Amino acid sequence: ELFLRPDLVACTFSGSVAISVAVSAPTRFLVLNALDLSVNRTSIRFQALEPTEVVFFKDDGVLVLGFAKQLPLGEGLLKMDFNGILNDQMRGFYRSKYQYKGKERNMAVTQFESVDARRCFPCWDEPAFKAKFKLTLEVPSELVALSNMPVGNATFAGPIKTVRYLESPPMSTYLVAIVVGLFEYVEGMTTKGTRVRVYTQIGKSNQGKFALDVGVKSLNLYKDYFDTPFPLPKLDMVAIPDFAAGAMENYGLVTYREVALLFDDKSSSASSRQSVAITVAHELAHQWFGNLVTMEWWTHLWLNEGFATWVSHLAVDSFFPQWNIWTQFLDSTTTALRLDSLEASHPIEVEIHHASEVDQIFDAISYDKGASVIRMLQSYLGAERFQKAMASYMKKYAFSNAKTEDLWAVLEKETGEPVKDLMTTWTKQKGYPVINAKIKGDDIEIEQAQFLLDGSSGSGMWIVPITSGCGAYDTQKKFLLKLKRDKMVIGSQCGDRKKGGNFWTKLNINGTGFYRVKYDDELAAALQNALETKKLSLMDKIGTVDDLYALSIARQQTFASLLRLLYGYRGEADYSVLSHINTVTTSIAKVSADATPALAGDIKQLLIKILLSPAEKLGWDPKKGESHLDVMLRPLLLTALVQLGHGKTINEGVRRFNIFTRDRGTSLLPPDTRKAAYLAVMQNVSSSNRSGYDALRKIYKESAEGEERLQVLGILSSCRDKGIVLESLNLIFTSEVRNQDAYILLRGIQPEAREISWNWLKENWELISKTFAGSLITDFVETIVPLFTSNEKAAEISKFFATRTKPGFERTLKQSLENVRISARWAEGIRSEPGLAQTVRELLAKP
């Protein structure tokens, strides 16, 4: 039982807790968690006993109570009173600021995952210690006070009300939630009668309608998918102005950043609609996978995050089939493949020895690799068998905890397949294989080896679900590669190799497997031909270029072969494929500037040539009735062309921006293309020519729309001018930029401004490490460090941080420095590659 009284003016809170504890073996100590709380020692009682010792271990967030004699065995009640501060670090019980009727006010919000419930009340703050929670809040009468469960009753005493909530089912501490502030809401109902609400700031509830619709549909879908009803009487979703993560799946009270929940038909972009849908579907999947069945310890975090990431795509694909979301899912897979090809990666199941280590595993391995290996397993087992097993798992472990092996055991029992042996190779060791494919007579010989971007070879071995198609997609083969080497027979259906016409073969069909493929010259040429003659699926177009890109960085394939393959995509019109091509072209433009400055201009012209025709087809103006994906493709291409320095696109962006500054309502610059125009303006900005920069700062200050403000914030540092870059970076220390949004400004930094930014980071490191807590500090490291491409710089950065690392960003720093060394090695390879200039000239000269 928990009682809390937040004071929103003084930004403090007081409370009391009564915990039912079962003493199962003789002891005279109770060891629980508490941090940054002052506990009233005279109030502590276990049954009638007072402790003789009360000791805090701050570094571990632990409170030890010592009693004079052994505690009575059996169940007893532990009680104590405490006080705390409503902090501004966006964790524990904290304050968020908002405007109401022109005045700034505070709201009180909780964020407990992973280990911050202990900052709000003394508790056993580990996922396996599930308990029923009964909350009481004492708050100002005019405010909305929400918790996980519906209100049981409320009593009023003048300006103060006491709100008592119904008792929750058994749940982990990290899912307890409280929100107190001024809100309005929109409301809906699931088919089973569960009430769903979206709470927003006063005046914004209209912008909650889209999320509400997705939320209701998600609860309906998951109830069927898991064959288990939603376990609580209500679900609330709330938009919070200051919020460290994107969203948090608290049981029955899901909290979000405003941009992750609010959508306005008039002022929001298509990509924003999509990310709101994915985020809502992800958090609501957790109500089952994570909240009803919870991982036993943080080592198994990937079960929560990987599964929610995967199943949110399944849900959104069912609501919005026209978005082609599974093709876009490959963004997650390629992100994970990139991180997992570093020596400094980690296994999906990562040992966690201390509370301070948990935050940094909320990364692309837990989420994106986790989701990708689930997709691989589901596609190997088949959708129906997989779903049945998930429903059994949900029923078996409801209201309790499970570990990775428990999931494999259920899947194995339901399907009879060797799930545990197969999946253990993917979750217990880091990394993944590259499959080398070579033609030998009528066979394709395949061999697996661990793939690392630094070109070294690891010793990992996997059980790999190999899929292959040849000549067509209706003749797919599947088998499990359990050895280092094996072979596949090439059938006649693969086309005729002799005539050179229609023969091709592709491994890892549609990228369902978490591995890369390296083809010998004959297979690679046949695949490039299949690409250019439009034989490949969208997903395989993505996999083909992503594999060759990674092999080129690792110097297992030439840079020229990557440019030739890219050239084969010049007629492409699909959003997902071009989104990947854009990732690759951005990276190529960056590395070539360092590797071959003399050739960098020509390489940029070649990249422009690849992207220009789809961009010209779409133009700047939206067309009536065009698809959601085309609406998202337009800004992607325009922004890419601006970044590559395409004069015509830059001038058009500036022209439209100038009209926009005079008339914000102009149809010449709708929300979707604004970022491209803003970026175009920043290309010409300097300390002596600041009018465009000042106009953008004005839009940032005056806009009421969260998304638009963030779009401006994202380009303010995208400039080569030292003075402007520093002025923008220093906004991070002002009240103009919320701490949660600092990373958006950092992401805009261009490679040309890396020295300025690095010096700024060094000079301000003390201030940064005081101001930014937890995961927010890693953003500074991972946005600035990887802009460099020399070993000397890696050594300098490493030396600077030698005395300044904290466990919270140690892993991120290692990964960022490794990326610098990999870029340096790639650049060195490009520098010494014979015949590169000739390849570039040939491709540029092609009609």
Image (cartoon, rainbow, N blue to C red):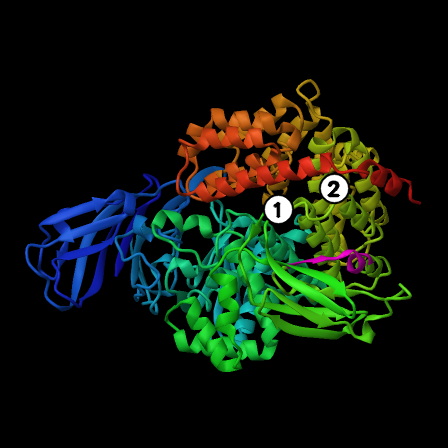
- The disc, 2 or 1, on the residue closer to the chain's N-terminal end is 1
Measure the C-alpha gap from mark 2 to mark 1: 29 Å
Q: Residue at x 73, y 61 (%)?
A: 438
Under mark 1, the amino acid is: Gly
Looking at the rendering, the stretch of residues picked out in magenta corresponds to 516-525
Asked whether 825 or 328 is in front, the reply is 825
The crowding category of the residue bearing disc 1, from other C-alpha atoms within 10 Å (few below 14, some 14 to 19, many at least 20), is: some
Mark 1, secondary structure of its residue? loop
Outermost residue toward the right in this view: 847
**Does residue 181 appear anywhere in the picture?**
no
Nearer the camera: disc 2 or disc 1:
1
Q: Position of residue 4 (x, y in %)?
A: 28, 52
* Quadrant of res 492: bottom right
Under mark 2, the amino acid is: Ala
In the picture provided, is 437 more to the left or to the right than 14? Answer: right
Asked whether 52 or 597 is in front, the reply is 597
Q: Tell me the quarter of the image containing the C terminus.
A: top right
Position of residue 124 relative to residue 752, above or below, is: below
Position of residue 797 relative to residue 466, above or below, is: above
User: Which residue is identified by label 1?
Assistant: 455
User: Which residue is identified by label 2?
Assistant: 640
Outermost residue toward the front in this view: 441
Q: Position of residue 228 (x, y in %)?
A: 47, 77
The crowding category of the residue bearing disc 2, from other C-alpha atoms within 10 Å (few below 14, some 14 to 19, many at least 20), is: many
**Within the magenta stretch, is there residue 642?**
no
Q: Position of residue 331 (x, y in %)?
A: 64, 55
Q: Tell me the quarter of the image containing the N terminus.
A: bottom left
